[in-house]
Amino acid sequence: MPAVSCARRPRGGNGVVFLPKRSDVTVPNALTMFRIVLAAIAALLFAFGRDTAAAAWMCIVASILDYFDGWYARRFRQKTRLGMHLDPFADKVLIAVVFVTAAAAVRYDWFSFLVALILLREIAVTWYRTARRKRYGQLTPASRMGKVKTFIQCAVGDGMLFYMFIHPQRVPERNLFLFVIMIVTVAVTLDSGMRYLLPRCRDGKRRSLLERLGRWIFAIRAREV
């Protein structure tokens, strides 16, 4: 049964969207499932120390497919309820595999602590979305800041895997650069989750601290002009 296309659906309070029932057999959903399979295979290869370079490439390919399946769903209007659950789940599985593997390879206490913060944020947001779905029957889509967060996580995590397993002679040492990029990644990760805790803005929308700061800075510059 082909996917049923529909126009953009209205959003409810708190940024939730309501999608009509439609076929879940779509190209984006198939790509998302493929990403989960790639992440699972990569995790097994990393765990047993088998062909870690291939495992790193699997994670990189899965990250690239994350952009493509989202683009395809929007371009051909194949957004589904299943896809809205599967896509963030696939992201979190991939992020967990990438950063836990990096932490095991680097073996710095501070690095493991930062990875734990990233994973705790992902678990907390997943719990929040699941609770809202069970209580209100509402789907909470990823925010703009959440998408930025996922992009940064994938870029940083895949970059580390590339240098650790594809070019092992370039494994990052205990240096300032590694510390800075992890601090930035954790800051953006935690900030994207703050939008669910902070009170709404005057326009009724939820925004993270960085989003509020950006709007405040642009507002000042606009008044100066």
Image: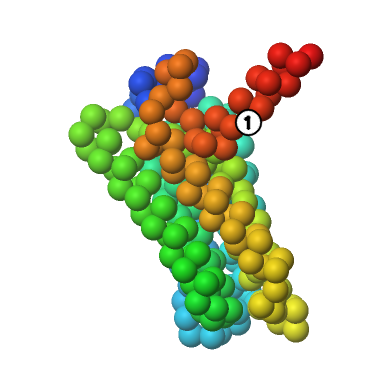
Q: Is residue 19 visible?
A: no
- Residue at 66% x, 61% y is 180
- The x, y position of residue 134, in whole percent, is 22, 37
- The x, y position of residue 98, in whole percent, is 54, 66
- Residue at 41% x, 24% y is 200
Looking at the rendered image, the quarter that the N terminus falls into is: top left
- Residue that carries the numbered disc 1 in the rendered image: 214
- The x, y position of residue 165, in whole percent, is 66, 78
- Residue at 73% x, 21% y is 221
Looking at the rendered image, the quarter that the C terminus falls into is: top right
Q: Is residue 89 above or below residue 215?
A: below
Q: What SS does tag 1 mark? A: helix
Q: Determine the image quadrant of residue 160.
A: bottom right
- Residue at 37% x, 37% y is 197
The kind of residue tagged 1 is Gly
62 relative to 29 in the view: left or right: right
The foreground one among 41 and 97 is 97
140 relative to 145 in the view: left or right: left
